[in-house]
């Protein structure tokens, strides 16, 4: 069965010839004399014969017509496959991707910590009211914390690791987008903050409308209320946040020259974030190598299948963020070069 499963193999074509030949003998359909002569040569020729390059496709295409002649017993086929699949066990296999980055990741995070310590000290000591620096350092620090989660919780080969990488990529694109548009959008740094807090206000408003106990939720609604009212009373905070997000992340990536970063990484990782079938198939299903089961897939409830390590790509994008911060705030060369050594 395994030998014949690929329908264009030489062995499978042999079987298809027998089916076609039997149907011709039974008079199920007729062929022109020249085509019939060509097909009847099939048993006499070796598969290496150049003429077979034309005969084999002819046989396959004609054999495919047979089901349309009304002689296919669908009930028998379903019964056959059903019984056969129950009589045999799965033959499962999976890919085990290695992870060799743990030691390097610890050193990399230590260097990043020194950089963020330096930048934060500059912010608090020199420009504590600089909204631009606050927003950019806030976004970069959030990326740094997502990166730390990958290392500290051994998420290198995990689904969650891809979620972290996707976030770091989006953060980098947003940083470049804000910098590029600060001259054309008035108060863009305030708008970015109000955009996010406005979404919190929407969630807070919904929580007040439901009549059920939310105390065990992972969301602390009292804390949310404090954040929403941190700078201005919430009744003056606009919940219509569409003014900032006129362009989706793809359009933003193109506008800042990061189309490849979006197309090669972000779009792929989004499948894992949204639970789309490609991500489910890659991460959560094992392949069965049994032809009796039609090579189906089986849920990976024992977590045998891992994913390729995200760490090199995390470093690549994080270094883009550090490079961007260096262009704006001049990180000491010794710190900057230590981090850049991990590139690639």
Image (tube, grey):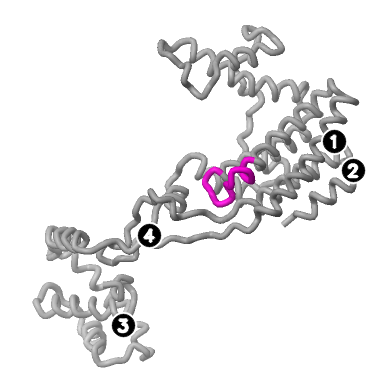
Structural distance between the alpha carbons of marks 4 and 2: 51 Å
Q: Secondary structure at mark 2?
A: loop
Q: From mark 1 to mark 2, how far is it between C-alphas? A: 9 Å
Q: CA distance from mark 4 to mark 3?
A: 34 Å
Quick check: 287 above or below 115? Answer: below
Instruction: Pick whichever of labels 4 and 2 is earlier in the sequence.
Output: 4
Label 2 vs 3, first from the N-terminus: 3
> Is label 1 in a helix, a strand or a loop?
helix
Rendered image: mark on residue 287: 4
The picture quadrant where one finds residue 8 is: bottom left
Residue 118 disc label: 1
- Mark 3 is surrounded, within 10 Å at the Cα level, by few (under 14), some (14 to 19) or many (20 or more) other residues, namely some
Q: Look at the image and say whether residue 272 sits in the magenta stretch.
A: no
Whether residue 84 is visible to the viewer of this picture, yes or no, is yes
Mark drawn on residue 332: 2
Q: Quadrant of residue 189?
A: top right
Give me the residue at 89% from left, 48% from top.
Answer: 334
Residue 7 x, y percent position in the rendering: 31, 71
Left-right relation of 321 to 93: right
- Circles 1 and 2: CB distance less than 8 Å? yes
4 or 3: mark nearer the eye: 4
**Is the Cβ of the residue at disc 2 closer than 8 Å to that at disc 3?**
no
Which quadrant does the C terminus fall into? bottom right
Residue sitting nearer the eye, 297 or 107: 107
Mark 1 or mark 2: whose residue is earlier in sequence: 1
Stretch in magenta:
149-160
Q: Residue at x 28, y 74 (%)?
A: 4
Is residue 152 part of the magenta span, yes or no? yes
**Which residue position is annotated with label 3?**
55
Position of the N terminus, as image quadrant, is bottom left
CB under 8 Å between discs 1 and 3: no
* Res. 250 in view: no
């Amino acid at each position: 069965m395994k030998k014949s499963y690929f329908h264009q193999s030489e062995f499978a074509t042999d079987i298809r010839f027998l089916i076609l030949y039997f149907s011709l003998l039974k008079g199920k359909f007729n062929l022109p004399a020249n085509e019939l002569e060509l097909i009847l040569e099939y048993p006499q020729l070796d598969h290496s014969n150049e003429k077979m390059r034309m005969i084999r496709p002819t046989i396959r295409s004609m054999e495919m017509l047979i089901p349309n002649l009304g002689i296919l017993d669908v009930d028998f086929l379903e019964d056959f496959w059903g019984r056969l699949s129950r009589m045999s066990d799965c033959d499962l296999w999976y890919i085990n991707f290695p992870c060799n980055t743990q030691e390097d990741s610890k050193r990399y995070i230590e260097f990043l910590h020194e950089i963020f310590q330096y930048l934060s000290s500059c912010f608090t000591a020199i420009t504590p009211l600089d909204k631009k620096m606050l927003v950019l350092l806030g976004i970069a620090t959030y990326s740094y914390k997502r990166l730390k989660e990958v290392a500290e919780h051994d998420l290198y080969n995990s689904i969650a690791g891809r979620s972290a990488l996707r976030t770091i990529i989006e953060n980098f694109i947003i940083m470049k987008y804000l910098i590029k548009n600060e001259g054309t959008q008035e108060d863009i740094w305030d708008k970015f903050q109000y955009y996010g807090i406005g979404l919190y206000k929407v969630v807070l408003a919904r929580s007040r409308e439901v009549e059920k106990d939310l105390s065990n939720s992972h969301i602390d609604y009292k804390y949310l209320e404090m954040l929403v009212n941190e700078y201005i009373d919430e009744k003056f905070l606009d919940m219509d946040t569409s003014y900032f997000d006129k362009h989706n992340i793809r359009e933003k990536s193109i506008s800042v020259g990061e189309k490849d970063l979006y197309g090669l990484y972000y779009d792929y990782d989004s499948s894992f974030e949204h639970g789309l079938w490609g991500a489910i198939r890659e991460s959560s299903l094992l392949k069965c190598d049994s032809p009796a089961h039609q090579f189906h897939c089986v849920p990976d409830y024992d977590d045998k299948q891992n994913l390729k390590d995200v760490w090199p790509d995390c470093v690549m994008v994080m270094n883009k963020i550090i490079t961007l911060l260096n262009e704006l705030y001049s990180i000491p060369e010794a710190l900057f070069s230590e981090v850049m050594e991990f590139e690639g």
